[in-house]
Image (cartoon, rainbow, N blue to C red):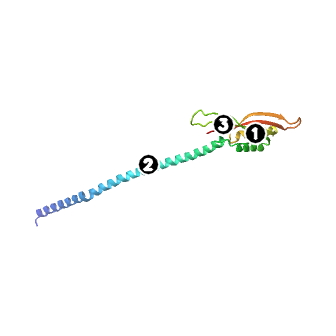
Amino acid sequence: MKGSTKRALSILIATLLFMATLGIYVSLIKPAYQDIDQIRGQLYTKNSQLNDYKNTISQMQTLLAQYDNLSQAQQSVSLMLPTQPSIPEAVFQISGIAGVSGLNLQSLSVKELAITPSISPLIKGMSTLRFSTKLTGTYESLKAFLQNMSANIRIFNINTVKVEKLGTTSNVFNFNIDIDAYYQTK
């Protein structure tokens, strides 16, 4: 074989190999790349959705935690300003505070005062219970009683205090105290 024939034959073989490679690229590799690009797009979209879901779940957990805090705050407000008169609880608190303060509860009466209407339709009205108490004890016990009443969870308002001395030599007094307790009306 001549050198020119060998050269022509090698150029022809190289051209056929190049054409075969180009055919394989066009028929097999290029569609595979298109599939890969499509799958990458789907993966990006799903990762984006996953991140959005994670952010939404995180925000929901934050809102639930805030809601739990609000329900705890609502419970505290319900203890401070109940939705019912809760007269037995108020009597128990007053008598307990009197006992802890060193005062003897002689008598206690309750009277319900008029309902204060609400200014806004979103806010409930308030009603007042007036507890008229007669307590016996020392002046220091009265100071402790007043201090403990102000630290109590339920809102009590001391309306009037009348002091009467028991005997001429004793350090014991009668205290007539009117206490207002409040509750929400429906």
Q: Earlier in the sequence, mark 3 or mark 1?
A: 1
Amino acid tagged 3: Ser
Compare residues 165 and 45 and report the one nearer the observer.
165
Q: Residues within 10 Å of mark 1 (few under 14, many from 20)?
A: few
Percent x, y of residue 89:
70, 44
Q: Residues within 10 Å of mark 2 (few under 14, many from 20)?
A: few
Q: Residue at x 54, y 47 (%)?
A: 64
Callout 2: SS: helix
Compare residues 41 and 53 and report the one nearer the observer.
53
Q: Evaluate if marks 3 and 1 touch, with contact meaning CB atoms under 8 Å apart.
A: no
Amino acid tagged 2: Asp
From the image, which quarter does the N terminus lie in?
bottom left
Amino acid tagged 1: Ser
Q: Residues within 10 Å of mark 3 (few under 14, many from 20)?
A: many
Callout 1: SS: strand
Q: Earlier in the sequence, mark 2 or mark 3?
A: 2
Q: Which mark is residue 109?
A: 1
Look at mark 2 in the image and give the residue it sits on.
52
| Spatial CA span between label 2 and label 3 | 49 Å
Q: Residue at x 32, y 56 (%)?
A: 36
| Spatial CA span between label 3 and label 1 | 17 Å
**Quarter-of-image position of residue 143:** top right
Q: Is residue 49 left or right of residue 8?
A: right
Q: Earlier in the sequence, mark 2 or mark 1?
A: 2
Compare residues 150 and 32 and report the one nearer the observer.
150
**Quarter-of-image position of residue 23:** bottom left
**Quarter-of-image position of residue 160:** top right
Percent x, y of residue 73:
61, 43
Q: Nearer the viewer, mark 2 or mark 1?
A: 1
Callout 3: SS: strand
Look at mark 3 in the image and give the residue it sits on.
127
Q: Is residue 64 left or right of residue 51?
A: right
